[in-house]
Amino acid sequence: MNIQTLTSTSTELKTGAEQAARELGELLLHTPEYELFLKTLDAVNNNLEVQKISAEIRSHQNAMRWSPGDTGEHDAALTRLEIELEVIQAVQEYRLAEEAACRLFAEVDSIISQAAGVPFATNAKRSGCGCGG
Amino acid sequence: MITEELQNCARDLGEALRSSASVQSYLKAQAGCEADPEASDLEKRLQVLYQELVGRQQRGVELQRSEIDAYNVLKSQVHHNPLIQERDAALSLVKQTFTDIADDLNFPLGVEFTTLALASNT
């Protein structure tokens, strides 16, 4: 097999995987689990109570960043605000939808990995350092 | 509930990845490591020693300098084994291929597939 044949075979395989990945992405996009995940995420982002609590959380975090020292008061406020956030109905609905979407994606990942012979998501995850490692 | 169409599509992607040069090289290198008594023994010993040291550290036992040195020697032997090096280099190429393909998967979704798929593991 010459270099040209090798290159074209490799390109065909990559195109096949690229095509399959796009198709899978499109299918996942239209699953009830993912649609509900996006809908509840949108509801959380547009919820005034969530926006108010999130702004308060940011304000305490900024205060802790710029005035380190005794952070007890801010820590207590953050804990209280996080609890307040989690009891909002829109947030609870989002958490349930997120859990269902994660379960679906994990199941899909398991099928890809089994067919590939190598774990997919674990090896497809970008490292956070930007070093490409 | 995962539909048959979704299952087939996920399987098609997995099979396309399995046919890729990078996965084929990795699987071959991995099989080479597993079949080699020295390489597989080194890896097993490193894993056992690592678990043992971490376990003791978690129980509050202070590790001796000699134990850490012994671990580092074994780790270096693992990293310098030619078959393990070959397999790790092949895995790096697999990661590159998978990361590129994940970008195609993420494109229609607007989120990172891997983040949601691995969320329950974290």
Image: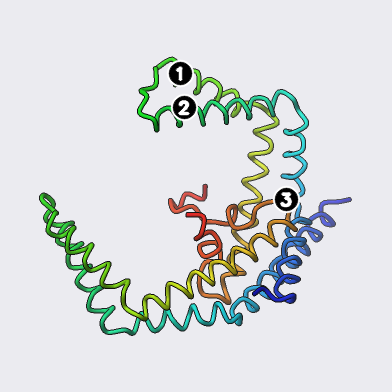
The quadrant holding residue A101 is bottom right
Chain for disc number 1:
B
Q: Which mark is residue B23?
A: 3
Which amino acid lies under the numbered mark 1 shown in the image of this protein?
Answer: Glu
Q: Which residue is mark 1?
A: B67
Locate residue B61 relative to residue A22 in the image: left or right: left
Are the residues under marks 3 and 1 on the same chain?
Answer: yes
| Residue A3 on image: x %, y % | 82, 52
Is residue A72 shown above or below B25?
Answer: below
Which amino acid lies under the numbered mark 3 shown in the image of this protein?
Answer: Val
Which secondary structure lies at badge 2? helix
Image quarter where the N terminus of chain B lies is bottom right
Q: Residues within 10 Å of mark 2 (few under 14, many from 20)?
A: some
| Residue B66 on image: x %, y % | 43, 15
Distance from label 2 to label 3 (Cα)? 33 Å
Q: Which residue is mark 2?
A: B53
